Amino acid sequence: MDKICQAYQEQFGLETMETLLAEHGRDCPLCRAFAARQRALQQVLPTWTTPETSPDFERDVIASIAEWQSNRSVLRSLFDGFLSYRVPVPVPIGLGLIALFCLSLYYNVQGYVSASSPGGGASVPMISHNPEGGASLPEVRSPQAQAVICQPLPSTLDAILPYTGGVGMIIVIPPISMMKNGLTFPMPLHSGEAEQPL
Amino acid sequence: MSLDHWVNECREGRTRAYAEIVRELRPRLLDYLYRMLQNRELAEEIGQETFLKAYQQLKKFNPAKASFTTWLFTLGRNLCIDTLRRMDGKRLDQEPSITLLALNPIPRDQAWENELENEIAHAVAQLDVLFRDTFILREYQGLEIEEIAQITNTNLGTVKSRLFRARQSLQLALKPVLQKAGIHYG
């Protein structure tokens, strides 16, 4: 079928577009036929009726709700409350904090491993530039001076990263605001208000 | 009292108002579920699960995003589709609503209506699930395309396309019946 015809026929029944379909149908026998068949079909659709539903339906729904409420023991309610703790942090910020925490963990572990291994630290003498041109090796007076000269200076990032894990934990876990639509954990928050039995 | 009033009452903790919500929306929801599943017991079972789930998740309902009816239908539709998938996509034949083996002869008009009803139900049951639910929501529930898009979690174009395909299929399936009835078929 012509895509244009299909586009017109998809508008059948939509008040805003039906006049366009009618106008198009004057010149297009396909669309005119479709509209006629659809009108015929819509005449008979109400013939299909649905059976009466059980008179106890509402009572059964209320009973199932009451059963669900009574199954929630005090301990489960507390457990639910803990699990449904909602962290009101926007998703991008939450993901960033998690990434920061993982990075911090990685550097902490790496630092621990390198600190505990023998002969840790760089021992390659660094070459300094001679202002008069050319490079020269630094003067090495003692092993301690050599260790100081050769040890790369800690970057700002290296200095603060060990602490970011702790900061991340402090920020992520406790609540900080009542913002909605934040990063959520498994279950929705249940308010502390007492549920009235039905 | 309007539906919105009862929903607000429930959200504020006055859960007895939920019975009013069930009373108001039961006919529409069960009508939809029955036409989808074509089995009364199953439709009622899914309907009960839907209302229970809606109650359990009432605090997640955001009136700014959708009406309560739309939200309830979304829950019901998802449960319905899950059920159909669990049944491995078996197409459901309609349960016979009226026996044709009556002791007394059925008047011709009634017999014709019975036949037509069975044919329509059978034809709808043969539709793909996604086309079926769009068709039912539009033709039997009278929902707008925008609402259907929200319930089915698709866009307007997809809804229109599915509706078109469903109508086309049904026109073809019911052609013999309609022509037999002398309905002008274009």
Image (cartoon, coloured by chain):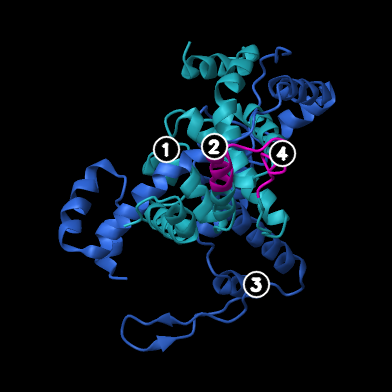
Chain colours: A blue, B cyan
Q: Nearer the viewer's eye, disc 4 or disc 2?
A: 4
Same-chain check, marks 3 and 1: no
Indicate the quadrant where residue A48 lies. Answer: top right
Q: How would you rate the neighbour count of disc 2 (Cα within 10 Å): few for under 14, some for 14-19, many for 20 or more?
A: many
Query: Residue under mark 1: which chain is it in?
Result: B
Q: CA distance from mark 2 to mark 3?
A: 65 Å
Q: Which residue is mark 4?
A: B102
Q: Which residue is mark 3?
A: A121
Q: CA distance from mark 4 to mark 2?
A: 37 Å
Query: Could one spot residue A88 in this view of the protein?
Result: no
Q: How would you rate the neighbour count of disc 1 (Cα within 10 Å): few for under 14, some for 14-19, many for 20 or more?
A: some
Mark number displayed over residue B143: 1
Could you tell me the amino acid type at mark 3?
Gly
Is residue B177 or residue B87 the one in the foreground? Answer: B177
Q: Nearer the viewer's eye, disc 2 or disc 1?
A: 1
Query: Is A20 drawn above or below residue A141 in the view shown?
Result: above
Mark number displayed over residue A146: none
Q: Which residues are magenta?
A: B94-117
